[in-house]
Image (cartoon, rainbow, N blue to C red):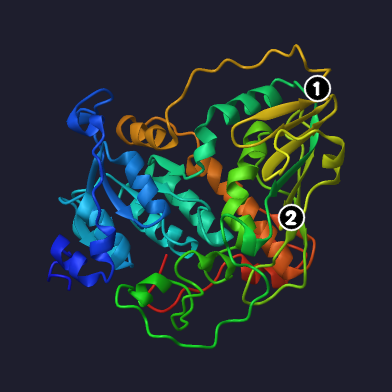
Amino acid sequence: MASRTGLLNRRDVLRTSVAGAALAGFVAVPRHVLGGAGHTPPSEKVNLGCIGVGNRGWQLIQGMQHHNIVALCDVDARYLAKAADRFEKANTYRDFRRMLDKEHKTIDAVTVATPDHVHVPASVMAMRMGKHCYTEKPLGHNVYEVREATRVAKRYGLATQLGNTGHSGNNYRDVVELIKAGTIGEVREVHAWCENEWETAPRVVSNGRRDRPQGTPSVPEYLAWDLWLGPAPYRPYHPAYHPVHWRGWWDFGNGRLGDMGCHLIDLPFSALDLTYPLTVEADGPPAHPESAPPWLISTWAFPARGDRPPVELTWYDGNKRPGLLKDLDPPDSRWPWYVLFVGADGMLISGIESFKLYPEEKFTGVQLPRLPQGPSHADDWLAACKTGGPTGCHFGYSGPLTETVLLGTVAFRAGEKLAWDAKNLTVTNCPAANRFIRRAYRQGWTL
């Protein structure tokens, strides 16, 4: 129902969506939108085009609605209807390429909250048009894509931010300060883990050595399936992919590590000034060609940095945990997702909102950081869009972080310990693994 200009008006979106009426509910308008406390003057507002407005994308928009939401894009008309009802003046699209083509003179910046396999195609196209970019984690679906997004962001000098919201939190900044100050001594060992079996986890990723579905149900009226696939190899629609469950399929996601690795590994990456690993290896059940495993343990070896020693970092998911935990009194008995730094003089374990130092009696009187409250992750980026200042999780930092995370899945799929040549983007000791570093795009899609 697009007009000749490629836009869908609000009435079109609501009519297209089977569930439009149910989803287009009332939303209260915050004071800052009406000019109350915290009001953002028009001269400081950023004109935003939002690519992916369901689920996480909708949450992002809510945190940025004090700026100008001028264009909305989603392949699922149900999500688009909900967003269009809230932001009545915004133009609506199903294809991000059409949105960027039509709105390039209108928007200053984009948010990208699509499935992982569309992150980089959308982000890179926007950045090549000179648009600032906030992209959800992981930055890309494969290592090559991430390197290209990092390169383009640097070339155009844009304000970028990876959606690692915890990066801007007070607990995160406190832990980074403590580690950098040497509170627990030299750190050579770090462990990070993420909770629960896949099918019972609060964030269902639906991993577990599954074959590709054989049925071919009809594509729902509300879903533009070919656009949802984007650059990924063609396959028939199935509800096993959309919504949410795409994370467990290699063509679209990278399992639990791809989903949460950038959140948790971000903390040691920043605190220890890590960049690219020298080697990476992984353990898990036999690799499946279609789907991610129900559990995974990945280990990266990082070189010394100046006077800082080499570091070994290990990731666990699927209810796997480091053995060191049995001797600790956890801040949360469930141990859902944490990072454990092992130092020469003690240990620090950090969750999302709190941390503990061990042995507790040794650190009873330790001076804790007193850092001022910083801006939210979104506001950090929005300010940079206007001022040109740096952001906390810009692509120059979060690109190497994401590459590292994705190399964990490459090692698992290759079944070998890999030696990594970061400069040349190549696995040097296992040529077969390089097929997972980059993939060909489906006809009609380029990067």
Q: Specify few, some or many for label 1: CA neighbours under 10 Å numbering under 14, 14-19, or 20 or more.
A: some
**Residue 159 locus on image (x, y percent):** 39, 39
Instruction: Tell which of 432 and 374 is nearer to you.
Output: 374
Quadrant occupied by the N terminus: bottom left
Q: Quadrant of residue 347?
A: top right
Which amino acid type is marked by label 1? Glu
For label 2, the residue is 319
Q: Is residue 116 above or below residue 110?
A: below
Instruction: Tell which of 280 and 347 is nearer to you.
Output: 347
Residue at 53% in and 53% down: 138
For label 1, the residue is 360
Work out whether residue 93 can be spotted. no
**Residue 77 locus on image (x, y percent):** 28, 67
Q: Is residue 194 above or below residue 44?
A: below
Q: Is residue 222 above or below residue 330?
A: below
Residue at 73% in and 52% down: 316
Q: Secondary structure at mark 2?
A: loop
Residue at 27% in and 57% down: 82
User: In the drawing, does residue 327 fall left or right of residue 162?
Assistant: right
Which amino acid type is marked by label 2? Asn
Q: Quadrant of residue 42?
A: top left
Residue at 69% in and 12% down: 367
| Numbered label attached to residue 5 | none
User: In the drawing, does residue 337 fall left or right of residue 358?
Assistant: left
Q: Secondary structure at mark 1?
A: loop
Going from the N terminus, do you reach mark 1 or mark 2 first? 2
**Residue 174 locus on image (x, y percent):** 61, 24
Q: Specify few, some or many for label 2: CA neighbours under 10 Å numbering under 14, 14-19, or 20 or more.
A: some
**Residue 205 locus on image (x, y percent):** 58, 63
